[in-house]
Amino acid sequence: MKSFINKSRVKSPWLIHFDCGSCNGCDIEVLACLTPVYDIERFGILNVGNPKHADILVVTGTVNHRNKKALRNVYDQMPEPKVVVAVGACGTTGGIFREAYNVVGGVDKIIPVDAYVSGCAAKPESIIDGVIIALGKLAEKGKKVDQGIFERLENTQNFIKNR
Amino acid sequence: MARTVIPFGPQHPVLPEPLHLTLTVEDEIVKSAIPKLGYVHRGLEKLAEIRDHSQMIQIVERVCGICSTLHAMCYCQGIEELMNVEVPPRAKFLRVIWAEMHRMHSHLLWLGLFADAFGFESLFMQFWRIRERIMDLQEATSGNRVIVSVNCVGGVKRDIDAETQKWILDTMKIVEKEVLQLKSTIMDDFTVKRRTVGIGVLSKEKAYEMGAAGPTLRASGIAQDLRQTGYAAYSDLNFEPVIETDGDCYARTVCRFNEVFQAIDLIREAFTKLPDGELAVKAKGLPNGEVVSRVEQPRGEVLYYLKGNGTKFLERVRIRTPTFANIPPLLDMLPGCDLADVPVLILTIDPCISCTER
């Protein structure tokens, strides 16, 4: 049961895309991944609108002082285990905008990032590659989370039995 | 009936970009809408103080990823006017070719996203499949799929050779055929018509009064297109603005759909008239004085105000983008519509929030 949940989670991860001060270049490339030429649905990846359904958070663009709260909010709403992919030069470091006055910097200043995708704008192939790298980390995290859940369940059952 | 306040965005499935609207609804009918902007503001205009006038080309290309080359073209035209540089004719025609390729990819992108907004997902996939052909052309001619960096002060950086020209023209034939196959779906389909005809009507007077720009203005029956002014090589090409008269969502869709074919025709004509010659002239001196430069983007008119003071840094760069002009008409359309039509209405002006907020 434990391995089944973890396996199916990695085989069909749901993805949420958050635009965080990007120039649209990476956004349309993330959307292009869903369309027939690249088609990430063949990996079972589905783009969802609700952070509560998602396993992977794909963030494009720099963080600014206004949307850092929104980014944190979306991240906190996602259930464990979760991974974050920072897309593009802006998402990783701030890129060409790093000196602008309203730019905080890369995504990793606000939330922990698991995979970085380079490029301005990042190509769909490299975005898919980044998501696949993140999936490996999702499997590892999933094992830990599941262990915790089943241990706690066993402890509770033992506690009830011994009462 | 009590009034309810519904927050729309900034993270919303239909919007690829963060835009917040506070909607006051009464029984599913929208009564008022208040926008909140600033989620993508980076402060690019201020970067002119630390980047010199030739480095700023890379910055303005990243104002918006969808119409990057048009931003750079508008900026370069302004700087060329300040420095009294005459652009060679071949560069002017190549600029038109890249600009029209960009317009095609932007309109196909919009048609797909619009289909997705009312839940027609297979149509979304079809438009984006066709769009990939144009992305391939952009990658082959400029080296990048989205940020097409070809403009420089005094001309263009890259050439399109005869072999590539033939390939582009062959691809245009395929694209034209494939987009024509979707014409009956986008124009005559029952579900598409139910979601678009008669919704969000913007009258001719209202559109003019509110200062709408681009297809939002032309779909209301006003034939105003900056390409008529003949910047770059448009004065040498046959150009008639595409207009529609109804002013509803359907008219705006048809207007953008027809502009795809217009772009194909312009590219063909530009290739037949493409003159030989050098690609760029060397720009001497430093920008001094002030200038207003305007270019027609896929979404409407973009305006650059540039002020130089004789040093290599510009004193002021001001960018006014088409979506900024189209937000007041949107706020005029929203009251009185169904809550379910709000995503369709927002997408119908083709919002580009990163342009607006820079």
Image (cartoon, coloured by chain):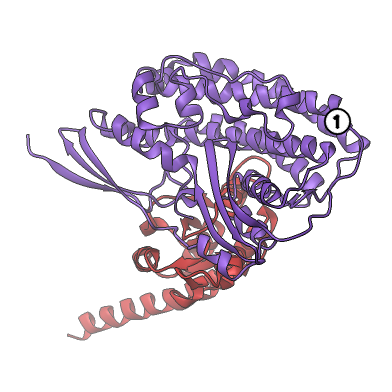
Chain colours: A red, B purple
Residue occupying the point 57% across, 15% down: B184
Rendered location of residue B45, percent (x, y): 52, 60
Circle 1 sits in a helix, a strand or a loop, which is it?
A: loop
Q: How many marks?
A: 1
Residue occupying the point 71% across, 52% down: B83
Q: How crowded is mark 1: few (under 14 residues within 10 Å), some or many (20 or more)?
A: some
Q: In which quarter of the image is residue B53?
A: bottom right
Question: Looking at numbered disc 1 in the image, what kind of residue is underneath it?
Answer: Leu
Left or right of B122, for residue B29: left
Q: In which quarter of the image is residue B256?
A: top right
Rendered location of residue B324, percent (x, y): 42, 43
In the rendered image, is residue A121 in sight? no
Rendered location of residue A53, percent (x, y): 39, 56
* Chain on which label 1 sits: B
Residue found farthest to the left? B1
Residue occupying the point 61% across, 49% down: A33
- Is the residue B76 above or below the residue A85 in the image? above
Residue occupying the point 85% across, 24% down: B272
Pointer 1: what residue?
B274
Nearer to the camera, A71 or A66? A66
Rendered location of residue B238, percent (x, y): 72, 19
- Is the residue B300 above or below the residue A61 in the image? above
Left or right of B59, for residue B93: right
Q: Quadrant of the N terminus of chain B?
A: top left
Nearer to the camera, A22 or A82? A22
Residue found farthest to the bottom? A162
In the rendered image, is residue B323 in sight? yes
Left or right of B103, for residue A72: left
